[in-house]
Amino acid sequence: MADVPPWPWVTALALGLEAMLGYPAALNRLAGHPVAWPAALIEGLEQRWNRPTASDRRRRLLGVALVVLLVAASVLLGAAVQGLAGTSLAAQAFIALVATVGLAQRSLHDHVTAVLAPLRAGDLPTARAAVGLIVGRDTEPLDAEGVAAAALESLAESFNDGVVAPALWLLAGGLPGLFAYKSVNTADSLVGHREERWRMFGWAAARTDDLMNLAPARLAGGLIALAGARTFADGWRIMVRDARRHASPNAGWPEAAMAGALGVQLGGDAVYDGARTERPTFGDGPRPTAADLERGLRLYRRACLLLWTIPLAAGLIVVLAR
């Protein structure tokens, strides 16, 4: 066991480094973000394998093959990086630095802050443009409350997808676990849709992503509710009551917790590609304002800090158990 990297400490260090540094803009301009690498592979294989002339059975089987290929490649890459790095303290710090590319605390905070600033200033067109970078719905129909709601929903859901889930998979499986989660999550975002083109081919990616997020999403909701402190009871109550209304088995947990902790209503109908889509609501309060979005960002920061205590506590348990 002596040569096994102490993943609790690596995870805690990775969270701290990413919160401080984010992903360097210069590196992004030079080489792009590493998440784009599996995305390019997924898009290329989708064009080759997901042919409309193929049978549903063949497309589903090829979708399963895509997920198996992605997970296998991710695990091998993660294991190779760990093996080459070694087990010294410097190696563990290097692995933590590599792991920051799979976390999004800083970038998520920055993107939502970019929505808040023009929204507070009453600049609705700029706020719509900013929120359009983090949501998939049409932003032109959104009023100020709609922009605030969209940003809060994205903040809550992405707290799981971009922070809690990757941190837990890093904690549980090191770089192989982190890379496998990120590749599956990327595949789900690209092909895990219900439209006819992707329904069969993206089935495996969507189901695997659901499974990999089952525990993290519920933890993310609990952390958001707990971060509300004085509003914990409301956050927890709304989360337990409303989470299952969401079409996703996971996204509703952090979104409902956010609605309850802030005392606002999230969700509701939205427009996608010009067509209105009926969606459930979460919470009993009024629609959120810019002030509520600012409160949501404070709640998010506290929830991130609470998340940090999990690997630290796990590391302490490992030390005491030796």
Image: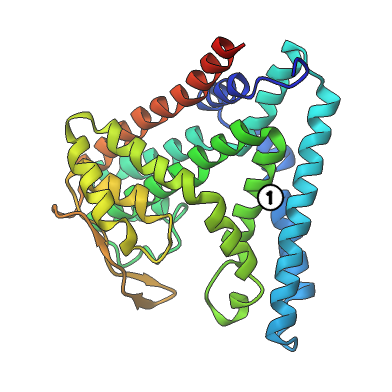
Tell me the quarter of the picture where residue 139 sits. Answer: bottom left
Q: Which residue shows up at 75% across the image and 58% down it?
A: 68
Q: Which residue shows up at 31% across the image and 74% down it?
A: 278
State left or right for residue 316 relative to residue 270: right
Compared with residue 227, is residue 206 higher up or lower down, i.e. above or below? below
In terms of depth relative to the viewer, which is nearer, 79 or 154?
79
Tell me the quarter of the picture where residue 231 sits. Answer: top left
In terms of depth relative to the viewer, which is nearer, 289 or 245?
245
Q: Report the residue that reaches farthest toward the front.
A: 321
Query: Residue 300: image x %, image y %?
Result: 35, 35
Q: How many marks are shown on the rendered structure? A: 1
Compared with residue 45, is residue 114 higher up or lower down, i.e. above or below? above
Q: Identity of the amino acid at label 1?
A: Ala
In terms of depth relative to the viewer, which is nearer, 115 or 47?
47
Q: What's the image's color scheme?
A: rainbow
Label 1 SS: helix
Query: Residue 70: image x %, image y %?
Result: 74, 54
Pointer 1: what residue?
Answer: 36
Residue 290 visible, this angle: no
Residue 153 visible, this angle: yes
